[in-house]
Image (cartoon, grey):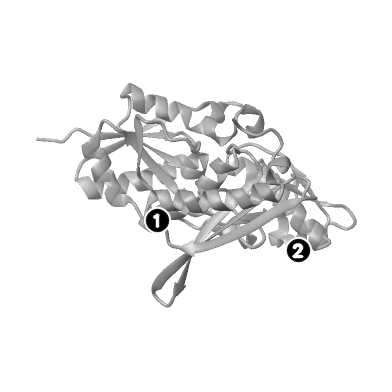
């Protein structure tokens, strides 16, 4: 007898479909059940307004969660950085698979790096597109400290649209996430990988979130086989920092937790955080190092501890209107 297909809810974008397709393949192998993709349009996909004005990247999540709660789909795949930091009681984050490359990247005209681009614009600022206040803050701060003439330009659109701005000459470059380009097979178009020392990623960037209803315990247990514990504690610490700063998904906050190892033995986790004004004139950037968290609560505590230090250094005043 043919088993009933599991219905995976996904946004319609090329990137969302690619990453959901990869999860669907993994779930098929894991469970032996067929998986079908159910495409769902979110408000974030249809609105042309800047994300910061319509509620941040959380606008990509609501329609998927509503479909889960209505029973239209059995589970959903999100880019983890899009998830609000408060988890609904009736939904469970069943798995956070191994994280992709968390870095931001530059796709520039003529194959130029960031430094080369700024030098090639002959007396005018290099016009670099991004829809992210976090990227604007760090890019402008880096340009200031290295004497580079850069102008950040707010943009929206899918990956094709954004890269098109650079290839058409409308902009000199755009900043994107390495993970997204990897997942759709376009990493070869990157002209410069921005080190995390230059630009801290968004909390959870590069990671996926697989979500189902709390009532479906059997499915949650099956999906949990895809969970990577190191990725889980790292992104939990990053998101805890974001939550403790009382900042929304669109606030100019970067965070990255990486594992420190001696040889093959992982012994510590370092959490770095940054908050800044979008013009790059002021940044608060701090880090904290501790034992690798052995539980969700320990990871949360690490994020909160760093947030307290950042708030003491004036982080709250750099985020504009704080999310309540």
Horizontal and vertical percent position of residue 202 = 57, 48
Return the residue at label 1: 98
Report the residue at 76% width, 52% height from top: 140
Q: Callout 2: few (<14), some (14-19), or many (20+) C-alpha neighbours within 10 Å?
A: some
Which circle's residue, 2 or 1, is located before the other in the chain?
1
240 and 172: which is toward the camera: 240
Horizontal and vertical percent position of residue 249 = 58, 38
Figure check: 197 above or below 27: below
Horizontal and vertical percent position of residue 288 = 56, 60
Q: Could you tell whether 240 is left or right of 232 in the image?
A: right
Report the residue at 76% width, 64% height from top: 116
The quadrant of the rendering that contains the C terminus is: top right
Q: Residue 215 bears which disc, if any?
A: none
Return the residue at label 2: 115
Q: Quadrant of residue 323?
A: top right
Q: Secondary structure at mark 2?
A: helix
Q: Secondary structure at mark 1?
A: loop
Figure check: 249 above or below 43: below
Point out the frontmost of discs 2 and 1.
1
Horizontal and vertical percent position of residue 13 = 49, 37
Report the residue at 42% width, 30% height from top: 64
Please count the marks in the image: 2
The answer to whether any part of residue 130 appears in the image is no
């Amino acid at each position: 007898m043919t088993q009933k297909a599991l219905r995976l809810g996904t946004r319609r974008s090329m990137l969302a479909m690619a990453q959901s397709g990869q999860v669907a393949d993994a779930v098929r192998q894991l469970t032996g059940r067929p998986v079908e993709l159910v495409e769902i349009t979110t408000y974030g996909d249809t609105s042309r307004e800047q994300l910061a004005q319509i509620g941040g990247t959380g606008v990509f999540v609501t329609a998927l969660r509503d479909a889960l709660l209505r029973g239209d789909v059995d589970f959903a795949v999100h880019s983890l950085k899009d998830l609000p930091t408060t988890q609904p009681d009736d939904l469970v984050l069943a798995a956070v698979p191994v994280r992709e490359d968390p870095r931001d990247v530059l796709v520039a005209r003529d194959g130029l790096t960031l430094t080369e681009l700024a030098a090639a614009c002959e007396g005018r600022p290099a016009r670099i597109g991004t829809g992210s206040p976090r990227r604007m803050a760090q890019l402008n701060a880096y340009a200031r400290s290295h004497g580079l003439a850069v102008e950040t330009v707010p943009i929206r659109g899918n990956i094709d649209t954004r890269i098109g701005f650079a290839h058409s000459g409308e902009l000199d470059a755009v900043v994107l996430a390495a993970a997204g380009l990897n997942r759709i097979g376009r990493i070869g178009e990157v002209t410069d990988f921005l080190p995390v020392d230059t630009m801290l990623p968004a909390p959870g960037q590069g990671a996926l979130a697989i979500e189902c209803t709390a009532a479906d315990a059997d499915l949650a247990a099956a999906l949990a086989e895809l969970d990577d514990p190191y990725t889980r504690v790292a992104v939990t610490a990053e998101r805890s920092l974001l939550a403790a700063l009382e900042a929304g998904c669109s606030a100019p906050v970067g965070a990255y937790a990486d594992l420190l190892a001696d040889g093959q033995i992982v012994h510590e986790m370092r959490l770095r955080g940054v908050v800044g004004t979008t013009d790059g004139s002021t940044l608060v950037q701090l880090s904290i190092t501790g034992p690798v968290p052995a539980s969700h609560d320990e990871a949360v505590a690490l994020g909160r501890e760093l947030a307290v230090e950042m708030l003491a250094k004036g982080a709250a005043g750099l985020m504009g209107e704080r999310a309540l």
